Amino acid sequence: MRYVVPAALLLVALIHAMPLIGVVSATKLEALYGITVRDSNLELLLRHRAVLFGLLAAFLAYAAFDPLLHRLALIAALASVIAFLLLAWQIDGYNAAISRVVLADLVALAALIVAAVVHALSPQAS
């Protein structure tokens, strides 16, 4: 059981690192999200979003190897995943690429719930 939390954090780090490719260009963002990015403001916001996801992914990967950071990492990851899923739930008609992001976040949520329960029940969690 001691590997459940680190494995979950590494999985979620990988999922959160995927959008990092969007930092490179609008073309990468378009391929990633199945959208057209013709507005420079939107491109800036999406590329910055990619940077933030990269930072979160780096923290989650680092925290996977430091038990003292597990709780904080689980909270940060859950906040990110739940926020996205709640927003997606409120919006109808997103495309197939975004549907894949929703699916990836559902996988992440399941892993994080299992990890959070294991963490909460572990003796060192207190």
Image: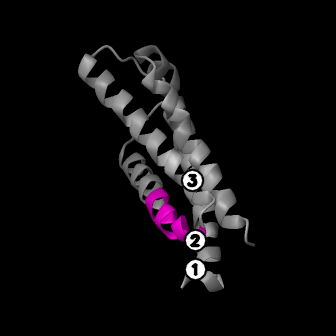
Q: Which residue is drawn at 46% across and 14% down?
A: 27
The circle drawn on residue 107 is none
Q: What stretch is highlighted in magenta?
A: 67-77
Q: Which of 84 and 9 is in front in this view?
A: 9
Which of the 4 image quadrants contains residue 70? Answer: bottom right
Q: Which of 58 and 33 is in front in this view?
A: 58
Reading the image, the residue beneath label 3 is 62
Between tags 3 and 2, which lies in front?
A: 3
Decide: few, some or many residues near mark 1? Use Cα within 10 Å; few <14, some 14-19, many ≥20.
few
Q: Residue at x 61, y 82 (%)?
A: 124
Picture colour scheme: one colour
Reading the image, the residue beneath label 2 is 116
Q: Which residue is drawn at 56% across and 35% down?
A: 18
Q: Which of 99 and 20 is in front in this view?
A: 20
Are the residues at dot 1 and dot 2 in contact (C-beta closer than 8 Å)? yes
Between tags 1 and 3, which lies in front?
A: 3
**In the image, residue 12 lies at what x, y percent?**
58, 51
**In the image, residue 58 lies at what x, y percent?**
52, 46
In the displayed structure image, the side of residue 46 where residue 6 appears, left or right: right
Mark pair 1, 3: CA separation: 20 Å
